Image (spheres, helix red, strand yellow):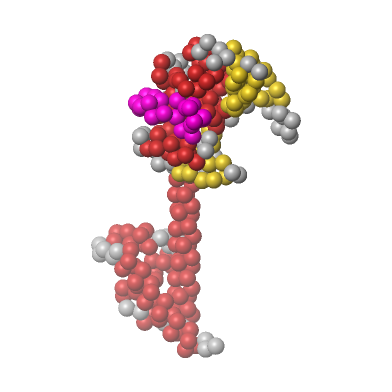
Amino acid sequence: MSFTADVKQEISLRELSGNEERAALSALIQMTSSLLITHGGLGLLIKTENGPVSRAIYRMVRERYQVEIIPSVKRRMNLKKNLIYELRLQGDVRSILEDLGIYSLQGLRDVPLRSIVRTDAYARAYLAGAFMAEGSVNSPATSNYHLEIKAANPRHAAFLCELMERFSIDAREVERRGRQVVYIKSAEKIADFLRAVEASENLMRFEDMRISRDMSNSIQRLNNVEIANELKSFNAAKNQLEDIAVLQKYGRLRDLDEKLKDIAQLRLEDPEASLSELSEIYRLRTGNIVSKSGMKHRFVRIHELAQKVKNQYEPE
């Protein structure tokens, strides 16, 4: 299964009671159902492509309401041919919608009544229901951290963002294909969301995979930096040897002062040493300390002298 399916399955197996169950159902019903007008009155048709989510809705509706539930399974006629799980509710549907805070005398509400999410526990349950209904999250094994929930309408998107703010989750909104989408891009905030909806097992899995991947990337970056530094050091040493060769060729190496002559001799003896390594070798041989920057400055002087000699003997 995908990571999204794993998270939804874990959430769907939570045993909720009382107002927490009502909050989860409020999100699920609003985001997965449509009203039906039948000869017997109002009905509800609930659709989802997730089997565990369908079973969770069935269980909670049956526990909470006296209503007839007719389940069915269909296959979507597209390339993927996904299964569609349907629940047809018949009975006093209006009372259910009123209890869930999404129906009034004016019709269906864009957002539920505030009492549905009055406490943090109710808000957690509502977010869990919203994610089960229209949520998705990328696997932490990928390089793109992304969690999103497709909202029922623009006001509902703002409502979801407000709920997430209670748990210090910075969510954003975007319109995509005519739908408002609430999304989170930060790995830390995605972890906070999984914690908020109490998807504990997948939270641990998410964190383990994220830390492992981030550590692997950090090691790779360090390796790249080390390789780049080694290449830079190699090229610098190569240029220094070329400068010394010019001075040797035209008999000017012996004219250098003792400090520059000592440094040139060190480079000739150890062509691959870094400036730091040459500084240490110099200290051990002479007892004098020359810093890395001091060593670099001396090689700059050698380069300048080599350029003068080349300009004198090898004019263009």
Q: Position of residue 272 (x, y in %)?
A: 45, 61
Q: Quadrant of the N terminus?
A: top right
Q: Position of residue 266 (x, y in %)?
A: 38, 66
7 vs 61: above or below? below
Picture residue at 48% right of the left edge, 57% below the top: 228
Residue 117 colored in magenta in the image: yes
Q: Position of residue 145 (x, y in %)?
A: 50, 41
Q: Position of residue 277 (x, y in %)?
A: 37, 58
Q: Total of numbered circles in the picture?
A: 0
Picture residue at 48% right of the left edge, 87% below the top: 311
Residue 15 in view here: yes
Residue 31 colored in magenta in the image: no
Picture residue at 45% right of the left edge, 58% below the top: 229
Q: Quadrant of the C terminus?
A: bottom right
Image quarter of residue 85: top right
State the residue in front, 219 or 114: 114
Taking 253 as reference, is 42 left or right? right
State the residue in front, 215 or 66: 66
Residue 187 in view here: no
69 vs 142: above or below? above
State the residue in front, 71 or 233: 71
56 vs 165: above or below? above
276 vs 129: above or below? below
Taking 29 as reference, is 158 left or right? left
- Magenta range is 101-123
Picture residue at 40% right of the left edge, 19% below the top: 19
